[in-house]
Image (cartoon, rainbow, N blue to C red):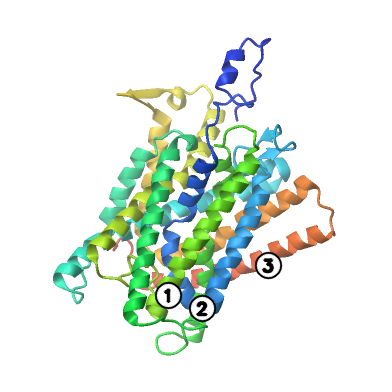
Amino acid sequence: MVAPMEVSVEAGNIDQSLWLDDDGRPRRTGTFWTASAHIITAVIGSGVLSLAWAIAQLGWIAGPSVMLLFAVVIYYTSTLLAECYRTGDPVNGKRNYTYMDAVRSNLGGAKVTFCGVIQYANLVGVAIGYTIASSISMRAIRRAGCFHVNGHVDPCRSSSNPYMILFGAVQIVFSQIPDFDQIWWLSIVAAVMSFTYSGIGLSLGIAQTVSNGGIQGSLTGISVGVGISSTQKVWRSLQAFGDIAFAYSFSNILIEIQDTIRAPPPSEAKVMKSATRLSVATTTVFYMLCGCMGYAAFGDAAPDNLLTGFGFYEPFWLLDVANVAIVVHLVGAYQVFCQPIFAFVERWASRRWPHSGFIARELKVGPFALSLFRLTWRSAFVCVTTVVAMLLPFFGNVVGLLGAVSFWPLTVYFPVEMYIAQRKVPRGSARWFSLKTLSVCCLVVSIAAAAGSIADVIDALKVYRPFSG
């Protein structure tokens, strides 16, 4: 970690104060808008496309209610987490550059390792999930054209493997962007794309509902009967919780996003809370509209991916536009989630081998300066996630499992524990009891959702052959 550097007349570097922050690092330039773009890019991801399926499992009463409940919980715990960016004084206190740093400053001990394992395993899982999702969208573009020409009877089968390899090749290029602060433009493009495909999905859902002559679905969701047993109903309902949790997931990179915001005033925590409020409110409106209209259009038959599960076949060109937007969004979202991994490994390598020329040396390629170590290890990381994605192309199952496993520890447990430690909330007080109750309730939800998703993955593995795509 870079130590804080004194900037003063006595030190002879007063001119550097113009481009250095209080910790001696290059001055941060992030704003409310760039932070909002990062959050929206992370949150309005491919998970929005599975919400119609999730509501179909829960029904008109539980589905929207659960979605609103998750929104409230995630916004509240995100405000707690934003307070942990600085230790001590909220304006001049020591900065915590990463989620792990915040846990180390406020909790310490084995919890730091636990946090690191969960956070980075989740980020790797998201990278794999986004690789799967992008290939599904690229394959859907080809299938939409095939259905348009040959009719819906033709299965129009094709392998997703070439598309995963193509997505991986693009990510190798974009992964050479040095750090989080320099991908703000990619996040803005990705955020625009997310609104594009969400808007198209919403419009098609409305059109299909009008064409049906009414709203599909029921108050309690999919009914037990032909094709679904009572056990499957339970597992799918639990998986729906995981899907919704994944759709709102961004706490695992909140501190890293906050570290891009320019120095106070106002404090980084205040800016981050405002960005979180706007982003969660915006995404909740989109989620409610897309999920509910998708369920209204297809009822119990809602696919696990609204735009690639071919609930819609026409207009095929509009589906192509939506799926192109999904792919462009996922290119940016992949980088938003992977930059913390890249930074963690590179900081560790610099500390471990401080005099290594391989790690420090840069390669000049035209106007670009490429780090040899960054080029090698980031490319290897992308290749590994691509190969694993080719082994496990279960979009809905992976989404639910990722959301379930990461929701409690990263979104609820650590923010609550750090807030209690930082604010010295008295043990046994009403606030302490309320926060602990929230944490325990969310733990139960996470365990139940993980169980449902694991059961679904096991069923899928029974009939799947690796690399068959």
At horizontal 34% and vertical 57% (from top left) the residue drawn is 390
* Vertical placement of residue 92 versus 434, above or below: above
Which quarter of the picture shows residue 449?
A: bottom right
Separation of residues labelled 2 and 1 (CA atoms): 9 Å
Category of crowding for the residue at label 1, using alpha-carbon neighbours closer than 10 angstroms: few (below 14), some (14–19), many (at least 20): many
Q: Nearer the viewer, mark 2 or mark 3?
A: 2
Q: Nearer the viewer, residue 111 or 176?
A: 176
* Amino acid found under the numbered disc labelled 1: Tyr
What residue did someone put label 3 on? Answer: 441
Quadrant housing the C terminus = bottom left
Q: Nearer the viewer, mark 1 or mark 3?
A: 1
Report if the CB atoms under discs 2 and 3 are less than 8 Å apart.
Answer: no
Report if the CB atoms under discs 2 and 1 are less than 8 Å apart.
Answer: yes
Secondary element type, mark 3? helix
At horizontal 70% and vertical 63% (from top left) the residue drawn is 438
* Vertical placement of residue 38 versus 352, above or below: below
What residue did someone put label 2 on? Answer: 60
Which quarter of the picture shows residue 272?
A: top right
What residue did someone put label 1 on? Answer: 295
Q: Nearer the viewer, residue 389 or 67?
A: 67
* Amino acid found under the numbered disc labelled 2: Trp
For the question of whether residue 51 can be seen, the reply is no
